[in-house]
Amino acid sequence: MADIATVFGWMPATMDAFSLTELMEWRERARQRSGTNSDG
C-alpha cells in the first residue's frame, strides 16, 4: 500500500475499502506510473 500511497498521494485509509484484487490493480498502475520495470 505504501507504493500506491506514494505514487498517487493517497492516505492508507483511502485504500482500506479496496479488495485485494483492487489493491493489486492499483499497485500495478503505481508501478507503471513510477517507471519501475520490475518488483526487485
Image (cartoon, grey):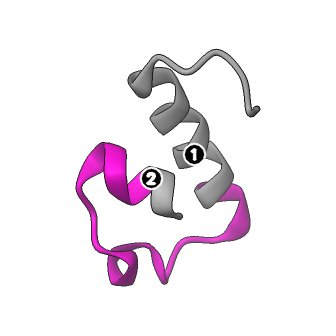
Magenta stretch: includes residue 19 = yes
Q: Residues within 10 Å of mark 2 (few under 14, many from 20)?
A: many
Q: CA distance from mark 2 to mark 1?
A: 6 Å
**What amino acid type should be assigned to the residue bearing mark 1?**
Arg
First in sequence, mark 2 or 1: give its number. Answer: 2
Q: From this viewpoint, which residue is outermost toward the right?
A: 40
7 with respect to 19 (left or right): left
Examine the image and state in which quarter residue 5 appears.
bottom left
Along the viewing direction, whichever of 18 and 9 lies nearer the viewer:
9
Q: Which mark is residue 1?
A: none
Magenta stretch: includes residue 12 = yes
12 with respect to 38 (left or right): left
- Does the residue at mark 2 contact the one at mark 1 (Cβ under 8 Å)? yes
- Indicate whether 22 appears above or below 34: below
**What amino acid type should be assigned to the residue bearing mark 2?**
Ile
Q: Which mark is residue 4?
A: 2
Q: Which mark is residue 27?
A: 1
Image mark count: 2
- Indicate whether 35 appears above or below 17: above
| Residue at 34% over, 52% down | 6
What range of the chain is rendered magenta? Answer: 4-22
**Magenta-highlighted stretch: main secondary structure?**
helix
Q: Under tag 2, what secondary structure?
A: helix
Q: From this viewpoint, which residue is outermost toward the front?
A: 40
Return the x and y of residue 23 as percentages of the image width and height: 60, 59
Return the x and y of residue 8 as percentages of the image width and height: 29, 47
- Indicate whether 13 appears above or below 19: below
Examine the image and state in which quarter residue 7 appears.
top left
Return the x and y of residue 18 as percentages of the image width and height: 54, 72
| Residue at 36% over, 84% down | 13
